[in-house]
């Protein structure tokens, strides 16, 4: 049995997976569904002083999912059992979602008086922290901060999404909220926030209790070729991008924040498989949140993600999620890993001769040759040590991990 419990900012979570603030937590009914589905903490959709006027269509998937697994199946029919990054069997890969949604379009008074008390009771009976999300300007945070505190939430996340692309307004917002409430407060930052190092140090000084990284990125545009219209209805057709395409950006922010502060960091962006939670933890996260996968796969995705997380940790002989926390940070220094061409090694027993490494080699360094392996003649990759640039693309696509770097 793997221990998935985490605790930070004085809060206990039975597992590290929360929902992220978005339509899946827009009211009491939806938050109860999230709690029943097994989230470790429940985060309400962001409220602001005035209800939002939401452009429609408000959400659309960017592409319909040409997955790595399909490409691999074409190249090596019947031979590929696992995806390169997945050994829990999860094959769900799609690219991104755009949304033109703002904050909640339900009046905050209604939510605070009618819906939050229901969630507070339901969540506390089940030991699930209930976190409010509020935005955006200092005065709005002052007013809403004390109101959500009175409504009995356990912590407050404040979104900095619409207060500019500079980090100083984020600090101002944090100061005001810190002065207005006694609860743990978490700053939710956007992937384009500059000077993460300085920002997190400032937030720590002010008494912010944690960071949530990140919100969506944009503006982003996608056009439906059959109609010529943008897929979402925001001004200029712009939307904000979430889902797997966001994950590397969010992960970079999480790791940068985790390297420069002791504050807990909650990773958000593109959690799609149990392994994504592992990755966020390795980059220093203390918990994760997910929105797009729950929107597109449903509330049952929460159970799947937790099962996959448990399976991965068990397969790798970890007994607690905390065992992997921050283990990648030591490899993330301000120096390049290397600037000379180290060719990868080939484990011929694992190589299936599929040719994907040859296909992606721009340096003409890979050949697929007939070799005698274990007494049998079959196809396997071979690398020209002189031509190889050490770029690593072949290593990253090898479906069986036959290629690897020795350092
Ligand atoms: C339709 C939609 C609405 C969202 N609304 C909010 C919001 O009200 N407040 C907020 O802080 N983030 C909001 N987000 C951002 C998510 O909370 C999350 O940070 C982002 O989607 C990345 O996570 P994901 O890739 O798991 O979706 C929204 C995202 C989507 C897709």
Image (spheres, grey):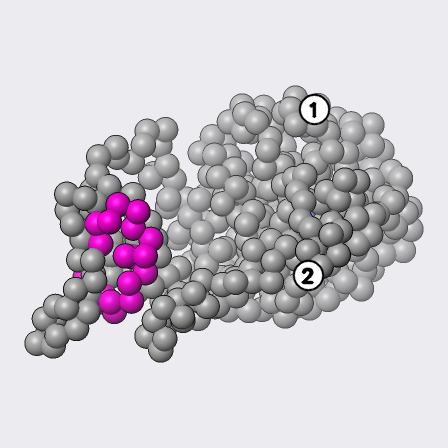
Q: Residue at x 44, y 71 (%)?
A: 89
Above or below, 69 against 277 in this view is below
N-terminal-most mark, 1 or 2: 1
Q: Nearer the viewer, mark 1 or mark 2?
A: 2
Q: Quadrant of residue 368?
A: bottom left
Q: Is residue 377 left or right of residue 60?
A: left
SS at badge 1: helix
Question: Which SS class for mark 2?
Answer: helix
Which of the labelled discs sits on residue 272, or is there none?
none
- Residue 26: where, in percent of width, then height? 79, 55
Residue at 36% across, 68% down: 75
Question: In the rendering, which numbered label is found on residue 295?
Answer: 2
Q: Within 8 Å of ligand 1, the CB of disc 2?
A: yes
Q: Which residue corresponds to mark 1?
A: 169
How far across and down, in percent of the image, does residue 316 sit?
34, 62
Q: Is residue 350 magenta?
A: yes
Which part of the image, by quadrant, shows the C terminus? top left
Q: Which residues are magenta?
A: 344-366
Tell me the residue at 14%/68% (across/down): 370
Q: Considering only vertical position in the picture, is 35 above or below 155?
A: below
Image quarter hosting the N terminus: bottom left
The quadrant in which residue 185 appears is top right
Count residues near mark 2 (Cα–Cα under 10 Å), then give few for <14, some for 14-19, many for 20+.
some
From the viewer's perspective, tell me whether residue 361 is left or right of residue 319. left
């Amino acid at each position: 049995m793997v221990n998935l419990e985490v605790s930070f900012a004085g809060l206990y979570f039975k597992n590290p997976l929360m929902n992220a603030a978005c339509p899946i937590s827009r009211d009491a009914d939806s938050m109860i569904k999230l709690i029943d589905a097994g989230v470790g903490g429940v985060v309400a959709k962001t409220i602001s002083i005035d209800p939002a006027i939401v452009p429609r269509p408000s959400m659309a998937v960017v592409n319909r999912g040409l997955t790595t697994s399909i490409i691999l199946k074409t190249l090596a029919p019947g031979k590929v059992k696992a995806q390169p990054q997945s050994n829990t069997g999860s094959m769900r890969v799609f690219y991104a979602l755009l949304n033109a949604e703002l904050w909640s379009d339900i009046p905050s008074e209604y939510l605070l008086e009618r819906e939050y008390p229901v969630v507070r009771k339901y969540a506390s009976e089940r030991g699930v922290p209930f976190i409010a999300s509020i935005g955006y300007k200092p005065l709005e945070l002052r007013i809403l901060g004390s109101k959500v505190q009175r409504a009995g939430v356990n912590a407050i996340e404040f979104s900095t999404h619409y207060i500019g692309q500079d980090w100083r307004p984020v600090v101002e917002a944090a100061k005001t909220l810190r002065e207005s409430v006694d609860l743990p407060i978490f700053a939710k930052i956007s992937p384009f926030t500059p000077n993460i190092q300085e920002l997190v140090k400032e937030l720590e000084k002010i008494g912010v209790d944690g960071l949530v990284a990140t919100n969506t990125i944009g503006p982003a545009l996608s056009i439906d070729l059959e109609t010529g219209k943008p897929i979402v209805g925001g001004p200029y057709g712009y939307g904000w991008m979430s889902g797997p395409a966001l994950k590397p950006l969010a992960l970079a922010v999480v790791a940068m924040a985790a390297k420069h502060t002791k504050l807990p960091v909650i990773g958000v962006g593109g959690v799609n498989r149990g392994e994504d939670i592992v990755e966020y933890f390795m980059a220093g996260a203390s918990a994760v949140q997910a929105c797009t996968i729950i929107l597109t796969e449903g509330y049952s995705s929460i159970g799947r993600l937790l099962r996959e997380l448990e399976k991965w940790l068990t397969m790798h002989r970890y007994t607690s999620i905390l065992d992997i926390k921050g283990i990648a940070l030591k490899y993330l220094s301000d120096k390049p890993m290397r600037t000379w061409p180290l060719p990868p090694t080939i484990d011929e027993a694992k190589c299936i001769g599929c040719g994907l490494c040859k296909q992606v080699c721009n340096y003409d360094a890979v050949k697929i040759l007939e070799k005698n392996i274990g007494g049998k003649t079959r196809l396997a990759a071979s690398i020209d040590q002189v031509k190889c640039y050490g770029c690593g693309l072949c290593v990253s696509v090898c479906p069986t991990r036959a290629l690897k770097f020795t350092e």
